[in-house]
Image (cartoon, rainbow, N blue to C red):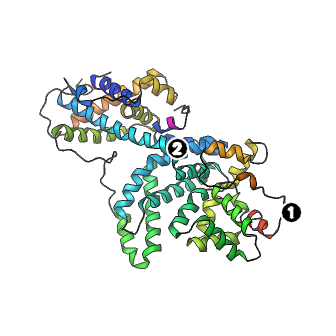
């Protein structure tokens, strides 16, 4: 191990332990190139350490990061990340989306139920393969995006992933366990226990639009 | 490289994007949803800062660079989910280059939506344009001799690292940049301590050779040499 390695390790381990350490003292006695190498490594480490610290904080507080986790782990493709981004770009909130979606699907639809299903799309627990083209097109229209792209965002690798998840968990998706694993904070305020998709025999028209494909 | 070892989501941040990408693809292939979520989040956060900086340099005032970066990450994740179905276990290529390709499309789509047809020419020039000129840590370049040499060394470090395979780059990243000890690196990567030391020895030799090969190091008037650069 070189002298620069030793001093860099001293610097980085102190910083990772949260201890204040002056780089200047560590530069003493080094030649110019060695000094520059230590400066370069310390700067790069500082940048990395700052990012890592930001990441630790973001894991607890950043809703976008949590949504990304839901996208990676859920059964709605990247809808949990993408739908809020499209909403932001379109300047509408979740309640407005639910209302507009209900209006476009037809006044006979149950607005509360449409809102709940839409929430599940953002939450990552509604299998994207079950959402009908009618819903996709209405949503794409509201969010000013391409319906094929919107559908693709939900269904990318979704069928196989859902099968694997169900197999791994021997049956239906345990929502509360799922939510706990992908993040403790719940920036979206709906209570999951209130939502339970009915059996196929009990579906009404709204259920068919969101579950029947 | 053996499977990465980590005890918490935070620890995943010490892995390179390439290793995280492989971890994600493997997790999606196996149905391991916790690892899929954790690896995707760490990788996304590593990329996000650079994507935001790039978006700032390549979009107008009407664009939200953070939103562009987040949309890029969503699309990249979507691509990775598709990829996972046929993933054969090989280490993925350069993740950042892949993200840049996607971001150019996101920016182009954004411009089309916001400004319409008259922006096509700008989109074409963007696609052919240079990447942003920020360094990997996004810091301002200093003006002292030490700083100039440090920047030069930093560039050489990247250049030399890129010549190593992904599993070795991971070891070098942890030892040389994150500051892990040989044992910590070995524990995290699944390599032996002696393997870590061998990789680092090769890296130092290569870095030393790169110092010597460089025609001039700005401001370097010393004859102290570098510990890894002694000619044999």
Note whether B110 is above or below A183 in the view shown. below
Residue B47 is situated, as x and y percent measured from the top left of the image, at 44, 49
Q: Is residue B222 magenta?
A: no
The image quarter containing residue B133 is: bottom left
Mark 2 belongs to chain: A
Note whether A42 is above or below B124 in the view shown. above
Q: Which mark is residue A202?
A: 1
Q: Does residue B91 appear in this view?
A: no
Principal secondary structure, stretch drawn in magenta: loop
The image quarter containing residue A135 is: bottom right
Residues tagged by mark 2 and mark 1 found on one chain of the structure: yes
Q: Which residues are magenta?
A: B1-11
Q: Pick the residue in front: B84 or B72.
A: B72
How much space separates mark 2 and mark 1, taking CA atoms?
40 Å
Q: Residue at coordinates 26% horizontally, 38% vertically from top-left?
A: B153
Residue B3 placement, left or right of A47: right
**Mark 1 Cα shell of 10 Å, populated few (<14), some (14-19), many (≥20):** few
**Mark 2 Cα shell of 10 Å, populated few (<14), some (14-19), many (≥20):** many
Mark 1 belongs to chain: A
Q: Pick the residue in front: B21 or B83.
A: B21
Q: Which residue is mark 2?
A: A59
The image quarter containing residue B194 is: top left
Residue B2 is situated, as x and y percent measured from the top left of the image, at 54, 31
Q: Pick the residue in front: A149 or B57.
A: B57
Residue B193 is situated, as x and y percent measured from the top left of the image, at 46, 21
Residue A172 placement, left or right of B223: right
């Amino acid at each position: 191990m070189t002298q620069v390695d030793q001093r860099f390790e001293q610097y980085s381990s102190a910083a990772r332990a949260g201890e204040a350490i002056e780089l200047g003292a560590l530069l003493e006695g080094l030649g110019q190139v060695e000094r520059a190498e230590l400066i370069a490594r310390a700067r790069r480490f500082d940048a990395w350490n700052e990012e890592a610290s930001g990441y630790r904080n973001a894991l607890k507080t950043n809703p976008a990061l949590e949504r990304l986790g839901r996208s990676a782990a859920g059964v709605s493709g990247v809808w949990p990340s993408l739908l809020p981004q499209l909403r932001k770009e379109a300047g509408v909130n979740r309640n407005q989306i639910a209302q507009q979606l209900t209006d476009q699907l037809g006044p006979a639809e149950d607005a509360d139920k449409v809102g709940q299903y839409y929430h599940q799309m953002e939450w990552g627990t509604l299998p994207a393969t079950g959402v009908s083209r009618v819903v996709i097109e209405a949503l794409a229209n509201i969010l000013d995006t391409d319906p094929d792209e919107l559908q693709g965002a939900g269904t990318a690798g979704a069928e196989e992933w859902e099968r694997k998840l169900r197999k791994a968990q021997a049956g239906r998706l345990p929502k509360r366990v799922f939510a706990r694993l992908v993040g403790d904070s719940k920036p979206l305020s709906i209570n999951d226990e209130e939502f339970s998709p009915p059996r196929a025999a009990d579906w009404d028209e709204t259920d068919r639009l969101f579950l029947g494909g | 490289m053996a499977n990465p070892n980590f005890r918490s989501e935070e620890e995943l941040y010490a892995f390179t994007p390439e290793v995280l990408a492989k971890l994600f693809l493997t997790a999606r292939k196996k149905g391991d949803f916790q690892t899929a979520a954790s690896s995707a989040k760490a990788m996304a956060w590593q990329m996000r800062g650079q994507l935001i900086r790039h978006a700032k340099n390549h979009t107008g005032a009407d664009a939200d660079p953070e939103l562009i970066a987040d949309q890029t990450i969503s699309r990249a994740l979507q691509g990775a989910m598709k990829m996972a179905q046929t993933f054969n276990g090989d280490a993925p290529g350069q993740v950042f280059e892949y993200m840049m390709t996607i971001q150019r499309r996101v920016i182009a789509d954004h411009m089309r939506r916001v400004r319409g047809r008259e922006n096509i020419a700008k989109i074409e020039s963007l696609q052919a344009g240079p990447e942003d000129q920020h360094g990997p840590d996004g810091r301002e370049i200093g003006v002292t001799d030490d700083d100039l040499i440090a920047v030069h060394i930093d560039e050489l470090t990247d250049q030399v690292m890129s010549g190593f395979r992904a599993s070795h780059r991971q070891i070098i990243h942890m030892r040389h940049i994150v500051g892990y000890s040989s044992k910590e690196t070995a524990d995290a990567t699944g390599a032996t301590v002696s393997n870590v030391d061998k990789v680092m020895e090769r890296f130092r030799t290569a870095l030393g050779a790169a110092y010597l090969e460089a025609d001039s190091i700005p401001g370097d008037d010393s004859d102290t040499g570098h510990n890894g650069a002694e000619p044999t």
